[in-house]
Image: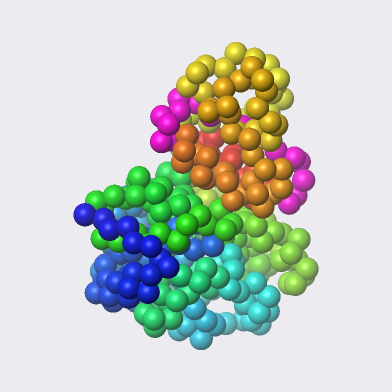
């Protein structure tokens, strides 16, 4: 049975620590999405993550830390760029890929020589990391290839009965996953876009590249970037080009995710009006996709997003959701 406990109660935090120390898995809120956490130094515990999610063993995990000191225990080289980035963006939604230390097992890194480390800002996750004293490997707390959960109830919808505990810390502040930046290539390379964007990273590091996203060899370094990911069960249609025509005759099982307000002739229960800011949209998109899944939507029609670089991370997730 899976218990769902309020994260605001110190007893829940102690219970999470007890379970993690014994090698069990706990779903914990972070500022991006809920994570499915296990002791990153325990091979057995980490193996449990792959089993519960049905995650292919070639997809490496992000290791969460509560300090630079804890990060340095997981990696074997800490370049000056890492210092600068940690100073500027940690704690927060930036994962840095660095050469792994011996303490990090090959299961975590999918056999590779590098490990992704991130220091989350969510106070619940931070508190648990501090109390545990060991780093936590944590992918998003969804089944493999499904939508990342931004509320405890969406974790439960996918993982109920598979893990002992979900900590309920309410809705995630950011709502989409962290930016993943590879610092082991000659030019720092973004492997996954997040709300910390290319321009912000270039401002502090100088040259930074964006890995080409689909099908390239480079992206196989980060299998989470393979396209068929982050998908709801319903078929997702991007309303590029012909939006006005697409919304004329909507089937009753088609949900709409739109920047426009609901027109008078449309059903407000299946028309999801999104915020017009990137931050607002990011915070809500997985929630709405999860809700469409819960409502057994057959199709989801998504209105095109503004063509501005600050929308890149959100556009990336919406595009991926359509690759099912
Ligand atoms: O915001 C986040 O990053 C959330 C929260 C829970 O922290 N975590 C998350 O983990 O999104 P996950 O496992 O769903 O996505 C991790 C991504 C995958 O695309 C994976 O391939 C990539 O990071 N990744 C992890 N380690 C890597 C490595 N050593 N080299 C390249 N890519 C790596
Ligand atoms: Mg994920």
User: Which residue extends farthest front?
Assistant: 9
- Is residue 120 shown in magenta? no
Vertical arrangement, residue 125 with respect to residue 172, above or below:
below
Residue 223 at x, y = what percent? Answer: 47, 53
Q: What stretch of residues is rendered in magenta? A: 293-310
29 and 10: which one is in front? 10
109 and 304: which one is in front? 304
Instruction: Report whether 84 appears left or right of 142.
Output: right
Could you tell me which residue is drawn at 58 percent across and 46 percent down? 284
Residue 281 at x, y = what percent? Answer: 64, 46
Residue 165 at x, y = what percent? Answer: 30, 61
Q: Quadrant of residue 19?
A: bottom left
User: Which residue extends farthest left?
Assistant: 1
Could you tell me which residue is drawn at 69 percent across and 59 percent down? 197
Instruction: Report whether 46 appears left or right of 202.
Output: left
Could you tell me which residue is drawn at 68 percent across and 67 percent down? 187
């Amino acid at each position: 049975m899976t218990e769902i406990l309020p994260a605001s109660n110190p007893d829940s935090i102690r219970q999470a620590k007890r379970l993690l120390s014994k090698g069990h898995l706990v779903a914990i809120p972070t500022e991006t999405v809920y994570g499915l956490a296990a002791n990153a130094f325990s091979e057995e515990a980490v193996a449990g993550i792959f089993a519960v999610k049905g995650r292919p063993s070639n997809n490496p995990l992000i290791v969460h830390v509560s300090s630079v000191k804890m990060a340095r225990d997981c990696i074997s080289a800490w370049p000056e760029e890492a210092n600068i980035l940690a100073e500027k963006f940690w704690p927060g939604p930036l994962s840095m890929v660095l050469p792994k230390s011996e303490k990090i097992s090959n299961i975590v890194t999918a056999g590779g020589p590098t490990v992704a480390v991130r220091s989350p800002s969510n106070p619940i996750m931070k508190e648990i990391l501090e109390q545990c004293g060991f780093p936590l490997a944590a992918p998003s707390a969804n089944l493999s290839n499904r939508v990342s959960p931004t509320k405890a109830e969406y974790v439960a919808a996918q993982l109920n009965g598979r893990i002992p505990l979900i900590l309920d810390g309410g809705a995630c502040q950011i709502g989409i996953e962290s930016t993943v930046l590879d610092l082991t290539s000659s030019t720092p390379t973004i492997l996954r876009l997040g709300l910390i964007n290319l321009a912000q990273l270039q401002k502090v590091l100088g040259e930074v590249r964006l890995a080409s996203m689909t099908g390239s060899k480079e992206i196989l370094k980060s299998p989470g970037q393979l396209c068929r990911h982050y998908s709801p069960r319903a078929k997702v249609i991007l309303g590029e080009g012909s939006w006005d025509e697409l919304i004329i005759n909507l089937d009753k099982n088609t949900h709409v995710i739109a920047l426009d307000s609901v027109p008078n002739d449309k059903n407000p229960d299946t028309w999801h009006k999104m915020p017009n800011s990137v931050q607002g949209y990011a915070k809500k998109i997985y929630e709405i996709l999860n809700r469409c899944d819960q409502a057994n939507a057959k199709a989801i029609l998504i209105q095109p997003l503004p063509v501005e670089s600050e929308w890149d991370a959100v556009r990336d997730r919406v595009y991926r959701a359509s690759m099912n």
